[in-house]
Image (cartoon, grey):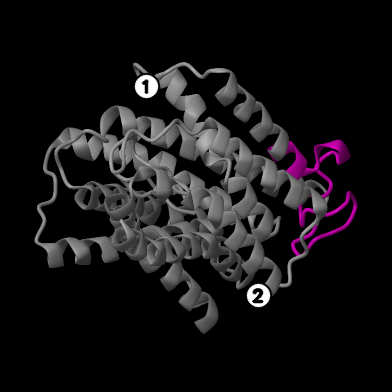
Amino acid sequence: MVGVRGRWWPGFVALSAIWGASFALIKVAVEAGVPPVWVAAWRCLLGAAALWAILAVRREAVPRDPAVWGHSAVAAVLLNAVPFVLFSYGETRVSSVLAGVLNAATPLFTLLFALAVVPGEPRPGPRRLAGLALGFAGVLTVLGVWHGFGGASAGGPAGEAGPSGGGAGAVAGGLACLAATCCYGAGFACLRRHLANRPHSATALSTVQITCGGAQLAVAAPLAAGAPHWPGAGAAGALLVLGALGTGVAYVLNLGLVRTAGTAVAAAVTYATPLWSTALGALLLAEPVGWNTLAGGIAVIAAVALTRPPAAGGGGGRPSVGAEGHVSRSVRVG
């Protein structure tokens, strides 16, 4: 047991840091002038390239079943194309700190959609219902609802403009991030119903999904924002890391964590990623962190702990949800 614990914690730290850093990387790209739809497109295209390379090294077969590709295309819309654009757009209006905290609500939306569309999903008891209530109270706290969302730009008091402005723009940005999180919830429910029990390897399913997302965005991006342009070395490096590492290689780390430590430990990444996103946003991007962002984030993390079902054994249980929108059978995000 000591040996297993010694093996999983480096992967846990690395994975939570990669997913937590995604929001700062998005911020670097959008502030360099990369349109949100192109940020999303590069994430998927570079992530797909990394996953195809991993498949080639492992000599794993790609699914050829049309049903797998069809369900993966739908999952890619919900888990990649739409939320990636929404988060990127949101971060043109709000801080990466706020975006990272809102992303932590993904498991709450996943539970709601699973209850609605997944057959046999256990009904929530008083503990999980209390967790849902606490989670949404935390989200409203992060958004500063008592001020009409006026503090959404940086998690500060109403009327204070954050690094990306305030007012109506902050409202739109915060709601865009929340809508992206809602998309993740619907997407994970789709995965559990249609893809999680397929016989194909998790890496192969993830490759198909991210490839579908890349194809969708490769068509949409030029139509919506014109041809891509060179954003500068800093932004290009951020996109490379965001795509190849955060949307590609991170999946391998997630799968390794599930195998060495079980789904309960892998799911706990959800609790750690907001810590990284907040720390990196504050330290590297000089983004202010208001009291409501901290208080609301703590409430959301506590709510996720309350709503999570008990683990069914060390390596069993349901697919684990990661803070950047990953599960043990597929890759988001974030």
Q: Is residue 179 above or below residue 114?
A: below
Q: Secondary structure at mark 1?
A: loop
Q: Is 72 left or right of 136, judged from the image as shown?
A: left
Q: In the rendered image, which residue does mark 2 sit on?
A: 284
Q: Secondary structure at mark 2?
A: helix
Mark 2: amino acid? Leu
Residue at figure coordinates x 58%, y 24% from the top left? 127
Q: Is 167 left or right of 109, judged from the image as shown?
A: right
Q: Give residue 65's mark.
A: none
Figure quadrant of residue 10: bottom left
What span is colored magenta in the figure? 139-165
Instruction: Give the mark, 2 or 1, whose residue is nearer the N terminus.
Output: 1
The answer to which of 182 and 136 lies nearer the viewer is 136
Residue 56 lies, in percent from the top left, at: 14, 64
Q: In the rendered image, which residue does mark 1 sit on?
A: 118
Residue 305 in sight from this viewpoint: yes
Q: Is 315 left or right of 106, judged from the image as shown?
A: left
